Image (spheres, rainbow, N blue to C red):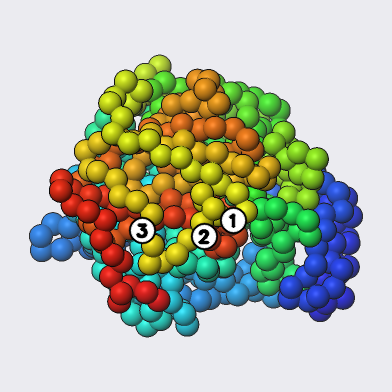
């Protein structure tokens, strides 16, 4: 089996990792860039994650039952792959709710180890956040509940157990969480799920000779696990049959470490309409879009009848001299779109989209700075018992974040959406002018992020901020803050929460 792995990896030839030995650990180095253009069969229909079906509680809340379990998934010919999933063998159903709705979850952990489910991008009480302080032991059920109160957006959910987040996501625990609201619903954007409003969870994976997931870390690489095959919604080599002129894609970079530079094979332009936290004020037309791990984007693409075109990830200009070790030079075909000979044409990209509050002129209650380097933030590693600071509810803070060690990082803050005020003192590029909860940090640049904290105060239960490159996060590039009500002071993490 080892031999087959070696042959298979070598067989990729131009690309990918070469195994020098070491079986499960695998010592890897990137031989050269990968280029899968023309190599992908695109013979499998894109799987669309099912919409989770809620029950209604007596009080009118929507109740979702989520069962985390191990299973097997057939991604390719040969043996099935051992995977994890929610209510299925791989990935998770899409949760879809409206702003204002009360939601309740029964998160049952049928796995053989503790994990958690974190609602990435959600504004909610810290005790419901599903981070490292809310582990769900094997065999137990966790019942978080809250009222959804934030603008329409494409959020997602995934495990967040300290030190094992990367492993648990890689095995397959990842789903989308779509919030709808009246304002977004009144726009004439494509909005029929799976038809012209298409979820795309993009993940890289590496398979061994037995079709099992491997977690290859390139030797000399700086980001963590980089795979050589791309799954979209768990589909390898997917095609999507387009039946409408305009299609909205809800892109999630659900990879552990890989940076994507999305574009189409013919360089057609598309409209970015929403980022992590919801709609942009107005669409931005582009032909390329970077997404780092954890970031989302909603784009609208136009198709012509009868045509075929691929979504692709192009090389990144942010890799530096050693970038090829981390896949920055790769060209990866992701999904083929096949347009029908006649296309329904009933939607549009409106000139004005979201009503995004501008925090630039707001009084700033507190300024903080964060330097990311060496798997630490401000020289400290994540410690479960240490609350790094408290923020005051109903105030605006400005966080200045710098990536200081030359490698790629990003920065994610729980509970809030933030506005990128400036990058190195300049107005940010258009893709960063929408509401964000995760932002790519280019080495050496200074990002000023403005955010307003509100309600859900709790002096004892922290929210996280961290790099969303999961190996960095698991190694401790993470910190904790609490949201304080008036007169409250930073408390202490309750002991029973330690796993
Ligand atoms: Cu996507 Cu702290 O998480
Ligand atoms: Cu999060
Ligand atoms: Cu990082």
SS for dot 1: loop
Could you classify mark 3 by the number of other residues whose Cα lies within 10 Å: few (under 14), some (14-19), or many (20 or more)?
many
* Earlier-in-chain disc, 2 versus 3: 2
| Residue furthest left in the image | 59
Is residue 127 or residue 45 the one in the foreground?
127
* Earlier-in-chain disc, 2 versus 1: 1
Q: Residue at x 41, y 21 (%)?
A: 282
Looking at the rendering, which quadrant does residue 99 occupy? top left
Q: CA distance from mark 1 to mark 3?
A: 18 Å
Query: x, y percentage for residue 241?
Result: 57, 42
State whether label 1 is within 8 Å of ligand 3.
yes
Q: Residue at x 46, y 40 (%)?
A: 369
Say which residue label 2 marks. Answer: 381
Say which residue label 1 marks. Answer: 375
Left or right: residue 218 versus residue 468 is right
Could you classify mark 2 by the number of other residues whose Cα lies within 10 Å: few (under 14), some (14-19), or many (20 or more)?
some
């Amino acid at each position: 089996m080892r031999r087959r792995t070696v042959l298979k990896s070598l067989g990729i030839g131009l690309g990918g990792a070469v195994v020098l030995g070491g079986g499960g650990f695998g010592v890897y180095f990137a031989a050269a860039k990968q280029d899968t253009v023309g190599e992908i069969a695109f013979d499998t229909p894109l799987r669309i994650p099912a919409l989770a079906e809620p029950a209604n509680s007596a009080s009118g809340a929507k109740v979702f039952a989520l069962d985390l379990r191990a299973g097997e998934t057939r991604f390719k010919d040969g043996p099935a792959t051992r995977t994890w999933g929610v209510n299925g063998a791989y990935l998770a159903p899409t949760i879809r709710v409206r702003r204002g709705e009360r939601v309740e979850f029964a998160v049952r952990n049928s796995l053989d180890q503790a994990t958690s489910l974190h609602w990435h991008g959600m504004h909610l009480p810290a005790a419901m956040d599903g981070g490292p302080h809310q582990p769900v032991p094997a065999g137990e059920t966790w019942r978080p509940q809250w009222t959804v109160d934030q603008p329409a957006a494409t959020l997602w959910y995934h495990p967040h157990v300290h030190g094992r987040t990367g492993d648990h996501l890689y095995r397959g625990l990842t789903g989308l969480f779509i919030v709808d609201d009246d304002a977004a619903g009144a726009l004439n954007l494509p909005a029929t799920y799976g038809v012209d409003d298409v979820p795309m969870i993009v993940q890289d994976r590496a398979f061994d000779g037995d079709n099992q997931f491997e977690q290859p870390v390139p030797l000399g690489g700086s980001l963590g696990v980089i795979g050589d095959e791309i799954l979209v919604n768990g589909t390898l080599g997917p095609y999507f049959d387009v039946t409408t002129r305009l299609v909205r894609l809800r892109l999630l970079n659900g990879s552990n470490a890989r940076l994507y530079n999305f574009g189409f094979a013919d360089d057609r332009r598309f409209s970015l309409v929403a980022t992590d936290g919801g709609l942009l004020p107005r669409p931005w037309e582009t032909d390329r879009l970077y997404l780092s791990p954890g970031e989302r984007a909603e784009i609208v693409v136009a198709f012509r009848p009868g045509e075929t075109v691929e979504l692709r990830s192009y090389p990144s200009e942010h890799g530096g001299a050693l970038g090829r070790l981390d896949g920055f030079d790769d060209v990866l075909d992701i999904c083929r779109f096949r347009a029908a000979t006649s296309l329904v044409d009933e939607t549009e990209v409106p000139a004005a989209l979201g009503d995004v509050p501008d925090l630039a002129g707001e009084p700033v209650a507190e300024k903080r700075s964060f330097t990311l380097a060496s798997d630490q933030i401000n020289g400290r590693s994540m410690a479960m018992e240490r609350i790094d600071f408290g923020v005051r509810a109903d105030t605006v803070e400005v966080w200045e974040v710098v990536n200081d060690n030359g490698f790629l990082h990003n920065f994610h803050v729980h509970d809030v959406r933030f506005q990128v005020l400036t990058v190195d003192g300049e107005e940010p590029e258009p893709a960063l002018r929408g509401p964000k909860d995760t932002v790519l940090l280019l080495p050496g640049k200074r990002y000023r992020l403005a955010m307003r904290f509100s309600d859900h105060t709790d002096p004892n239960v922290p929210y996280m901020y961290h790099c969303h490159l999961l190996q960095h996060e698991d190694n401790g590039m993470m910190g904790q803050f609490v949201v304080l009500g008036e007169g409250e002071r930073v408390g202490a993490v309750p002991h029973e929460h330690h796993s």
